[in-house]
Image: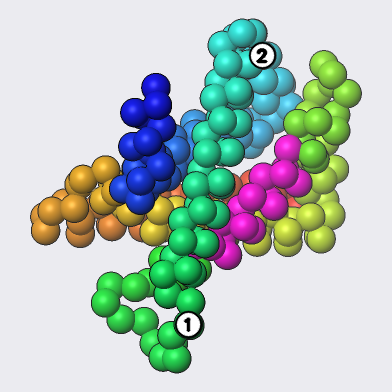
Amino acid sequence: MMDFIGRIATPVGKKMLMGITGLGFCGFLVVHLAGNFTLFQGAEAFAEYTEKLHSLGFLLQLSEFVLLLMALAHVLTGVVLALENLQARPERYQVTARHGGRTLGSSTMIYTGLLTLAFIVLHLIGFKFSPPSGASRYPVVVETFSRLTYVGAYLLGILAISFHVSHGFWSAFQSLGANGEGSTPFLMRCATWLAVGVGIGFGSIPLVFFLL
């Protein structure tokens, strides 16, 4: 156990932990989006989906606990790595132009990460913990997305997640050793498509409910 902790504490170990937890959340985003699409089928379909989800009982609770641990590990490790990078390079670059493969997604990871964290907290408060136990969440979704301020905040959060994923997805594989000349361009394209899919998919939900 101590040997495992020692390996995780190394710079390489931290990046691997970030990669594993990040890929886990990418998988969660895809599954969560697929479930949320039942909102477009109406209240009955969404209620049926949530009932099936909650019928999992212990498995659902275990999944939520694992997601919580992954979130804590990802956030804390990200903060530690960011602080270590600042200590290793305390002075900011004077040149703001991107070069050496840097992208908007990679250069804003710390900011999009913080925005994503804030979005997740507000999202959980608004949709998971606010409705009374056993109450349908469909009316909550309809009412919430009728407010322009919340729709704007939601879209900002989704935009942050999309930019975070656009770099984080392929970077996670790179941290786990998939950094060959052939695999990296492919993974970067996959990351772009995933980011676009997440942005359009999740972003369409508040827009449709607000406009219709």
Query: Quick check: 208 left or right of 133?
Result: left
The structure's colour scheme is: rainbow
Check if mark 2's residue and mark 1's residue have beta carbons within 8 Å.
Answer: no
Does dot 1 land on a helix, a strand or a loop?
A: loop
Tell me: residue 64, above or below residue 81.
above
Q: Quadrant of residue 95?
A: bottom left
Identify which residue is drawn at 81% across, 31% down: 129
Q: Mark 2 against mark 1, which lies toward the viewer?
A: 1
Q: Which residues are magenta?
A: 109-124
Question: Distance from label 2 to label 1 (Cα)?
Answer: 50 Å
Residue 139 shows up from this direction: no
The percent coordinates of residue 137 (x first, y second) are 78, 29
The residue most toward the right is: 132
Identify which residue is drawn at 66% across, 14% down: 54
In this figure, which residue is indicated by the disc labeled 1? 91
Query: Quick check: 98 left or right of 151?
Result: left
The percent coordinates of residue 27 (x first, y second) are 43, 35
The percent coordinates of residue 97 (x first, y second) are 39, 87
In this figure, which residue is indicated by the disc labeled 2? 54
140 or 17: nearer the viewer? 17
Tell me: residue 90, above or below residue 200.
below
